[in-house]
């Protein structure tokens, strides 16, 4: 089963790679030399999305249905198996920041394996561009680390339910961080649905609102991950958009944009490892290997890293090819599959309130996405 999943994800990734034409050999470099007049005009002119530039210059056509099918299948399979192997890894060794860091390192190795032989064009960024991405890498590191710790602290299914509340954090941040974004009343109503669903999942039948010690860890760390993800999305949206708009000169495709952020995230996560776990890591490793073979632990960590990187890269590539409504539908379906699948695999019992709360929260996320898109379309139409 594991080999089949790896093959499926690899095929999806490879199929996407071969639709972009020729690729040059190289690794990420920093431009220190002076730019030509043409390069300066390209880099300082009004940013255009990659697809807009392709349309003007006669670039490649939209993704084929087969490519989209392979991408979404690889995304779903990768996400599902990541959660499985991540939980096995965090169950085996209580050094969860180290597990998170190792997962990111696997992605770094994968990126260089793509760039060095020229399978994919390497990104070319200036010093200032790299600095602009550093805070995004920090928030990505916190989001990933928080997610790993949340799922390692308790039930994966419950952590996933809490993580469904990420839009709530984003919407709140949009009220306090410039540029301030006011959502429509319908969108805010859907956020209340999400909060209500998560709250219901915390209520034990016959006991009222009671967060057990088992659920406290996943609730706290998943909320931390949601906050970090919200900051990453809010503060990094314009930066990554501008960089990807210059893809013709800096090779910042959707896949490479994720790869660069993943590398920065690994660097930030290393700091957490050195400050939080480095001193106790030898003892934790001895305790872990006394119960579980070292090879099994290493395999679970490595596989979780492989699936983590593949599912994120494939998700980036898929979502960059489809519209917002399709994105919302596929994201919603993905979370449902993960919640149900992990609950079955790990025998995590879900009471009636948890099941209903999960359904309400996930549905609220989907409806919120639709409300937000309707609001954007209405504002666009009103401005014309």
Image (tube, helix red, strand yellow):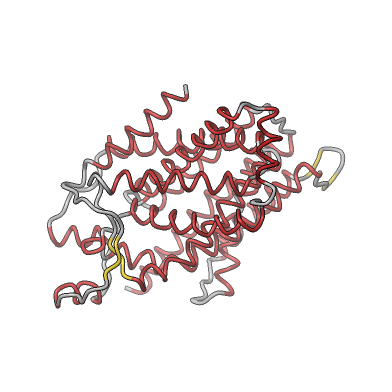
Q: In the current view of this chain or complex, which residue is farthest to the top?
A: 1
Q: Position of residue 140 (x, y in %)?
A: 51, 57
Q: Position of residue 105 (x, y in %)?
A: 46, 47
Q: Is residue 350 above or below residue 319?
A: above
Horizontal side of 10 relative to 183 (left or right) equals left
Q: Position of residue 107 (x, y in %)?
A: 42, 46
- Quadrant assignment, res 227: bottom right
Image label count: 0
Quarter holding the C terminus is bottom left
Q: Is residue 47 above or below residue 91?
A: below
Looking at the image, which residue is at 80% across and 47% down? 211
Instruction: State whether residue 101 appears in this view.
Output: yes
Q: Is residue 335 above or below residue 175?
A: above
Q: Nearer the viewer, residue 192 or 384?
A: 192
- Quadrant assignment, res 318: top left
Horizontal side of 303 relative to 160 (left or right) equals left
Q: Is residue 262 above or below residue 180?
A: above
Q: Nearer the viewer, residue 379 or 83?
A: 83
Q: Nearer the viewer, residue 51 or 243?
A: 243
Q: Position of residue 87 (x, y in %)?
A: 61, 36
Looking at the image, which residue is at 27% across and 69% down? 31
Instruction: State whether residue 326 appears in this view.
Output: no
């Amino acid at each position: 089963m594991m080999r089949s999943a790896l093959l499926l994800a690899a095929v999806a990734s490879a199929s996407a790679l071969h639709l972009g034409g020729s690729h040059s050999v190289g690794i990420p470099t920093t431009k220190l030399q002076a730019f030509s007049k043409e390069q300066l005009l390209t880099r300082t002119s009004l940013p255009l999305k990659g697809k807009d530039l392709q349309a003007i210059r006669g670039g490649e056509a939209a993704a084929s249905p087969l490519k989209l099918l392979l991408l979404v299948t690889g995304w779903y399979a990768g996400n599902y198996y990541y959660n499985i192997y991540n939980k096995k890894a965090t169950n085996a060794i209580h050094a969860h920041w180290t597990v998170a860091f190792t997962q990111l390192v696997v992605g770094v190795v994968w990126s260089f394996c793509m760039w060095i032989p020229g399978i994919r064009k390497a990104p070319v960024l200036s010093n200032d561009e790299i600095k602009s991405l550093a805070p995004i890498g920090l928030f990505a590191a916190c989001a990933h680390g928080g997610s790993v710790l949340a799922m390692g602290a308790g039930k994966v299914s419950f952590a996933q339910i809490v993580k469904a509340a990420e839009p709530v954090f984003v919407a709140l941040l949009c009220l306090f961080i410039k540029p301030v974004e006011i959502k429509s009343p319908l969108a805010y109503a859907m956020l209340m649905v999400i909060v209500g669903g998560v709250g219901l999942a915390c209520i034990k039948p016959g006991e009222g609102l009671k967060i057990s010690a088992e659920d406290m860890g996943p609730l706290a760390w998943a909320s931390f991950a949601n906050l970090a993800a919200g900051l990453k999305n809010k503060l990094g949206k314009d930066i990554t958009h501008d960089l990807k708009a210059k893809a013709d000169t800096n090779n910042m495709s959707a896949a490479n944009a994720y790869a660069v952020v993943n590398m920065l995230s690994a660097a930030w996560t290393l700091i957490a490892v050195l400050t939080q776990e480095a001193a106790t890591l030898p003892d934790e490793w001895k305790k872990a290997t006394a119960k579980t073979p070292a090879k099994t632990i290493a395999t679970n960590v490595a596989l979780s890293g492989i699936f983590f990187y593949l599912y994120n890269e494939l998700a980036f590539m898929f979502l960059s090819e489809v519209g917002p409504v399709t994105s919302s539908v596929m994201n919603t379906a993905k979370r449902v599959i993960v919640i149900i699948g992990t609950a079955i695999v790990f025998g995590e019992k879900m009471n009636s309130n948890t099941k209903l709360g999960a359904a309400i929260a996930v549905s609220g996320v989907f409806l919120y996405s639709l409300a937000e898109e309707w609001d954007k379309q209405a504002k666009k139409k009103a401005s014309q």
